[in-house]
Amino acid sequence: MSRGESSTPLGKVRGLGSAHHGGEHWLRERLNSAAMLFLGLWLVVSLLLLPDLGRDTLGEWLAAPSGAVPMILFVILAFQHSVDGLKVVIDDYVHDEANRLLVTGLLYFAAIGAGALALFSLAAIAFGA
Amino acid sequence: MLVSILHRVTGSALSVAGLAILTWWLWAIADGGPSYDRFVEYALSPLGIAVLVGLTWAFWQHLLSGIRHLVMDIGAGFELRINKLFAVLTIAGSLFLTALTWAIALGVFQ
C-alpha cells in the first residue's frame, strides 16, 4: 500500500515528514508507554512483596535474573520515556532556539549519564563488584 | 484540562526527582553498607518521606492519566461525559492507590 491510502490516522502519516519516520517515532513512544505501564506496576508490586527493604534483601532480589532483567528494562525504558516526555515539555515552553538546543542537550547528557550509572550499579549488584 | 496538566507535572517530577532517587538507590545498594545506610537515613527523614509519598502519588496519577491518553490515542473516549468521568476517575484512583500503597508498605493489613 502506498502512502496516504491507509484508513487509519497513523497509517496515513507513516513515512511522511522530512525524516520519513515521524509516525514510527510516535508509535515507538506509545509502545514504550505501554511497556512502562507493566514495568511500573511490576516495580511497585515487587517492592511491596519483598519481606523488607534492607540492603541484603534488595541485593539478593536484584542479583537474580527475575529481578535484574525487569529492572534493567525498567531503567532503560524509564530514561527513554522521560527524555521523550521532557523533550515535549521543553519544546512547548522554551521558545528561544538557542536556549532550547542547550536545554535539550543538557537533558540528553543528564539522562545518558544517570542511566549509565544506574545500569552500572545493577551490573555491580548482579556480578558482585 | 486539569488532568492533562497533571500528566505533565507528574511526569516531569517522576523524570527528574524519581529517576534521580532511583539511580541513587541502585548505586547505594551496589556500593554497600554505609552508602545504603545514608540513603535510608535521608529517605526516612520527614522531607524524604514527603518526597516519597509525593512521588508515589505522581506515579499513580501519571499511570492512570497515561492509560487515559493511550485509550484516547486509539480514538476512543472522546465523548464529553465519558472523557470527564475518566478524568475524574484518574484523580480519585491515584489518591486511593497512593493510600493503599502506603498502607501495605506500613503493614496495615498484616
Image: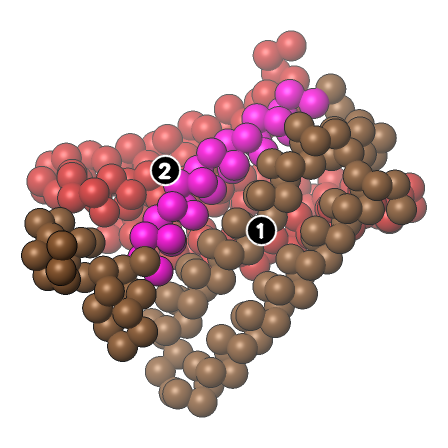
Quarter of the picture holding the N terminus of chain A: bottom left
Residue type at the position of mark 2: Leu
User: Chain coloured red: which letter?
Assistant: B
Q: Along the line of sight, which residue is nearer the eye, A47 or B47?
A: A47
Q: Along the line of sight, which residue is nearer the eye, A20 or B83?
A: A20
Q: Secondary structure at mark 2?
A: helix
User: Chain coloured brown: which letter?
Assistant: A
**B101 shown above or below B43:** above
Provide the residue span drawn in magenta: A25-50
Q: Secondary structure at mark 1?
A: helix
Residue at left offset 37%, top offset 66%? A88
Q: Residue A110 lies in what quarter of the image?
A: bottom right
- Residue B71 can be seen, yes or no: yes
Q: Chain of mark 1?
A: A
Q: Position of residue B31 (x, y in %)?
A: 86, 48
Residue at left offset 64%, top offset 21%? A49
User: Residue tagged by mark 1?
Assistant: A76
Mark sitting on residue B20: none
Mark sitting on residue B64: 2
**A99 shown above or below A65:** below
Principal secondary structure, stretch drawn in magenta: helix
Circle 2 Cα neighbour tier, 10 Å, few/some/many (<14 / 14–19 / ≥20): many
Q: Chain of mark 2?
A: B
Q: Along the line of sight, which residue is nearer the eye, A83 or A96?
A: A83
- The outermost residue toward the front is A1
Circle 1 Cα neighbour tier, 10 Å, few/some/many (<14 / 14–19 / ≥20): some
Q: Position of residue A4 (x, y in %)?
A: 10, 61
Q: Position of residue A33 (x, y in %)?
A: 40, 46
Residue at left offset 8%, top offset 57%? A5
**A105 shown above or below A26:** below
Residue type at the position of mark 1: Ile
Is residue A45 a member of the stretch shown in magenta?
yes
